[in-house]
Amino acid sequence: MSKHEMAFSSAVAKQPSAAKEPKGRSLWADGWRRLRKNRLAMLGLFIIAFMTFLAVFAPLVAPYDPIEQLIWTKGKAARLAPPSKEHWFGTDLYGRDVLSRVIYGTRISLTIAVAASVVSLVIGVTLGAVAGYYGGKIDDFISWLINVIYAFPFLLFVLSIVAFRPASLTLVYVAIGFVSWPSIARVVRGQVLSIKETEFVEAARAVGAKDFGIIFRHILPNVIAPVIVQVTLGMGSMIMTEASLTFLGFGTQPPTPSWGYMINQGREYLLSGQWWWSVFPGLAISLTVLGFNLLGDGLRDALDPRLNK
Amino acid sequence: MVANRCQVALYVSLARWLFCVDGSENMGRYVVRRLVGAIPVFVGVIVVVFILTTVVPGDPARIMAGQRGDPETIARIRKEMGLDDPLHIQMLNFFKSAVTFNLGRSYRNNMQVSEAILSRFPATFKLAVAGMVIAVVLGMTSGIISAVKQYSVLDYTSMFVALVGISAPSFWIGLLLIWLFCVILRWVPGTGTGNGEFVYLILPAVTLGVRPAALIARMTRSSMLEVIRQDYIRTAWAKGLGARTVILKHALKNAMIPVVTIVGVETASLLSGVVLIESVFQWPGVGRLFVDALTYRDFPIIRGEVLFLAGLFIVSNLLVDLSYAIFDPRIRYD
């Protein structure tokens, strides 16, 4: 497609939306305005921002090294010490500071959430767009694939991928992403199905735009909003899945401060009264997942034009 | 030739009946059609299970032979297990065994896979039913109250609790419950099943029920709120019907469809939940069997479990779709 053709097709594509909108208010500005009014969503955003801050600045924020075993320097007193001024969240069996481990744990959880989302986005958007755009046999095949993956209980599927392979963070997020793409593909497919019939797509085709260009330049930008909602809500369940995996003892190597793994290690001691080892990582998981759920719910309300009264 | 013609006629009429060529519809036909539709999905499930448990690092024969297995033993085991066959032959064999659910014996204790799973299933079934009953009762009650008393303290509290219930990991909630009710208060035993006494069921069932209860509560609330504002409810109030009749008979029944969907989806995802909850509570069900099998790389059990649970999942989704008709006769099977 030549330059002026492209300019023409994008001008054609932009026209209908430009005509509809009052000046200076895009879908995104509108969405943000609605989102800002939603106090719970803002709380969710705050929680996620806070956790991200902790993850990025963990070495500065954490009072101790997360894998340093203080029993070697401070003696037995550092073993399973209850919460105190020195150790806000207490210490574990090896004299490691639980607060520092929880802070470093944000890195793992957020990495999983982001990386697994990227994996599921790449697969889900591509397959969903292809299925919706081309239809026919290709759509049948991809829809069948979606149904097959949906037929597995989620955690079982991830466990079957992760359990027999050497533990690594990469494996965990690839596995989680690989199992969670169908929900994104479904959303994208549905949206593409309806958008491909619109006039601006027809116009783009009329000026000779290639399929690839139509899908990526004209159709996908209109699918972003529902995908964002899906991804945000999905991140919460990805963090939960990672925690479940490591709780069962799969997916992480021992000194790594993963929240699920910490809960697993501390569970025996919970019964003998040393509750802090398991309770604080669990709180961290709950808070983070709550943040994503609140923000996801808020985004859905803010970006879903059907609810726009 | 005559027999052939008869057969063709039979197939044609069967196909007509299945695909409603004459335009009529009935439930039996719908069930058969859905079951037939599930076949390609199940074929896909079998292929995926095969790939997941075959394309893995490490030689299962070596694992079976143990640390001291000499090369000859390993070679013999490989041959017995058909590991030397080309992949497509292995896959065909797996297909045959999957369809007949004759998946061989456990590497660990030589038990038939189907026997191992079926002997564990009643415990899981009991737990899942108890969990779901708790979830439905708790979730619907609080959902209805929240909707009827919208924006009250009760509404805010129960919706906040529901949000926390969705966000907190179930295994962690289970541990907290054990800590509170078993270690501190000493009201109930913590883990295991005892001699099958009811008390042992309470904590695991509650733990399993928390998440679905929260989701059901949220869905019941929003669905009820939508229904309550409709004209026929106003008419019901205007006729002077009692609150109980209006809310439970007129409103709730029409608010049930989305709730039934959530109940169905959650019943299915309960199958993921039991894996965690059974590990926390040492509950001898299929979930723990699965985790143990993963730890010991007991591939026949793993394959059997995944196939069994995926099949259960497909069937429970079908049951959910069928149950819609009970709540809304307007829904047609087509």
Image: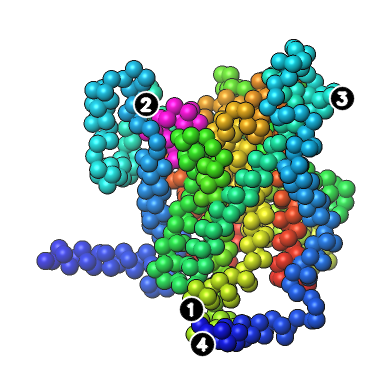
The numbered dot on residue A210 is: 1
Q: Main secondary structure of the magenta part?
A: helix
User: Which structural element holds mark 2?
Assistant: helix
- Name the spot of residue A178 as percent of width and height, x first: 51, 50
Q: Which residue is mark 3?
A: A85
Q: Is B24 displayed left or right of A177 in the figure?
A: left
Q: Which of pointers 3 and 1 lies earlier in the amino acid sequence?
A: 3
What's the residue type where badge 3 is placed?
Lys
Q: Nearer the viewer, residue B73 or B276?
A: B73
In the image, which is nearer the foreground, mark 1 or mark 2?
A: 1
Residue B63, label in figure: 2
Question: Judging from the image, what secondary structure is the residue with disc 1 in?
Answer: loop
Name which residue lies at 40% across and 36% down.
Answer: B57
Identify the chain of the residue marked 3, using the numbered disc in the image.
A
The N terminus of chain B, quarter of image: bottom left
Label 4, label 3: how far apart the Cα atoms are: 71 Å
Disc 4/disc 1 C-alpha distance (Å): 10 Å
Disc 4 residue type (three-letter): Ala
Q: Earlier in the sequence, mark 4 or mark 3?
A: 3
Range drawn in magenta = B291-307
- Residue B202 lies, in percent from the top left, at 66, 29
The correct choice, above or below, for A271 with respect to B136 in the image is above
- The kind of residue tagged 2 is Ile
Point out residue A23 in the picture as x, y percentages from the top left corner: 80, 81
